[in-house]
């Protein structure tokens, strides 16, 4: 065994060039295989067209399972925004030997391009509970921001994705709130924080942005007697052309959202959070919304002061 291991290590160390060549050859062969065997399907959902390139080679899930997964994600996003947020989306799905759904990326080219990977042994249940494709499609529904405000692009996707899936009947509200309470603290500012525009850590980019979205949602509902929420603001931004292919300054989008709700919540919250560590009392927020997490279960208190706001956030509009 030892001899084998030594030999293996030597081969590994000595084989950089041959391995590189080998990879190139594999990529070349894979591209040829793709060109020959790639299967494209077109889906029409929520007023948008999705050109899907299906993965090639053997997978544990069927092509119909994959198309059902795409349809589910598109339906969740359509439910939340009132329509699919791209007239035409190119969705390229590839297969590899990693696990489950992974490596989703959304680009603004050609009206919107999403690339995402599936492990060959991804199970149908992995597709049924996947969040990543919904997250990527939500990126289509907001204009592209300067790098400083990348947090709002990610934060909106993180916050809206489970809400959209609950509204579409794909996720239980209990599960959504359990995970939100479990994870949202990752967005809180740390000791050296300089505000969302100047702190580009993973936690502040994804969860700091989600915290902005949650606080905005609750404040809009407080100020409109729960008639409107972040969803109305985001629909207005989308319907005024604020999509991923457009480069906007953040305040243009936020002002547009505020006009739709008749409030100043988004712009004022941005000014609060952009260049200083604005601490949010999450424990108090969960109490006001009537959410208690006990171990692995969540309990709702319908008598809490803002229970109606909690219910409205996940109600289909
Ligand atoms: Zn993202």
Image (cartoon, grey):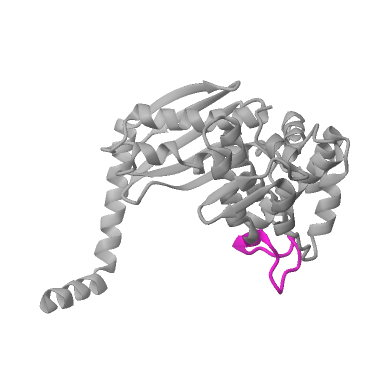
Residue 271 left/right relative to 299: right
Segment colored magenta: 186-204
Query: Looking at the image, which is closer to me, 229 or 194?
Result: 229
* x then y, percent, for residue 172: 54, 37
Quadrant the C terminus occupies: top right
Quadrant the N terminus occupies: bottom left
Residue 66 left/right relative to 306: left
* x then y, percent, for residue 257: 80, 38
Q: Residue at x 73, y 32 (%)?
A: 235
Query: Looking at the image, which is closer to me, 115 or 294?
Result: 294
Q: Is residue 83 magenta?
A: no
* x then y, percent, for residue 218: 76, 44
* Quadrant of residue 46 within the rendered picture: top right
* x then y, percent, for residue 186: 62, 61
Q: Residue at x 75, y 49 (%)?
A: 288
Above/below status of 83 relative to 243: above
Q: Residue at x 79, y 58 (%)?
A: 273
* Quadrant of residue 88 within the rendered picture: top right
The answer to whether residue 86 shows anywhere in this view is: no
**Magenta region, mostly helix, strand or loop?**
loop
């Amino acid at each position: 065994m030892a001899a084998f291991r030594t030999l293996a290590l030597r081969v590994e160390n000595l084989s950089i060039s041959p391995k590189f060549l080998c990879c190139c050859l594999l990529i070349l062969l894979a591209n040829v295989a793709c060109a020959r065997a790639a299967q494209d399907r077109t889906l029409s959902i929520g007023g948008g067209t999705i050109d899907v390139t299906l993965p090639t080679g053997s997978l544990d899930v069927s092509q119909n399972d994959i198309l059902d997964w795409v349809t589910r994600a598109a339906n969740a996003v359509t439910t939340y925004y009132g329509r699919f947020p791209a007239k035409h989306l190119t969705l390229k799905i590839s297969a590899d030997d990693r696990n489950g759904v992974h490596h989703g990326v959304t680009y603004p080219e050609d009206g919107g391009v999403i690339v995402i990977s599936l492990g060959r042994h991804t199970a149908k249940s992995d597709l049924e509970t996947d969040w990543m494709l919904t997250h990527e499609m939500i990126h289509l529904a907001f204009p592209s921001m300067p790098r400083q405000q990348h947090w709002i692009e990610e934060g909106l996707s993180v916050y809206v994705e489970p809400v959209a899936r609950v509204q579409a009947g794909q996720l239980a509200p209990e599960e959504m709130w359990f995970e939100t309470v479990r994870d949202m603290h990752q967005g809180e500012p740390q000791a050296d924080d300089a505000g969302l525009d100047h702190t580009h850590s993973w936690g502040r980019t994804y969860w700091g942005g989600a915290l902005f979205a949650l606080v905005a949602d609750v404040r809009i509902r407080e100020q409109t007697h729960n008639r409107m929420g972040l969803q109305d603001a985001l629909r207005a931004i989308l319907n005024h052309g604020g999509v991923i292919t457009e480069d906007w300054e953040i305040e243009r989008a936020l002002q547009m959202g505020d006009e739709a709700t008749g409030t100043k919540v988004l712009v004022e919250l941005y000014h609060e959070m952009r260049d200083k560590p604005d601490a949010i009392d999450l424990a108090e927020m969960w109490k006001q919304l009537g959410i208690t997490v006990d171990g692995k279960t969540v309990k709702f208190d319908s008598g809490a002061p803002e229970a109606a706001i909690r219910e409205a956030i996940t109600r289909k509009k």
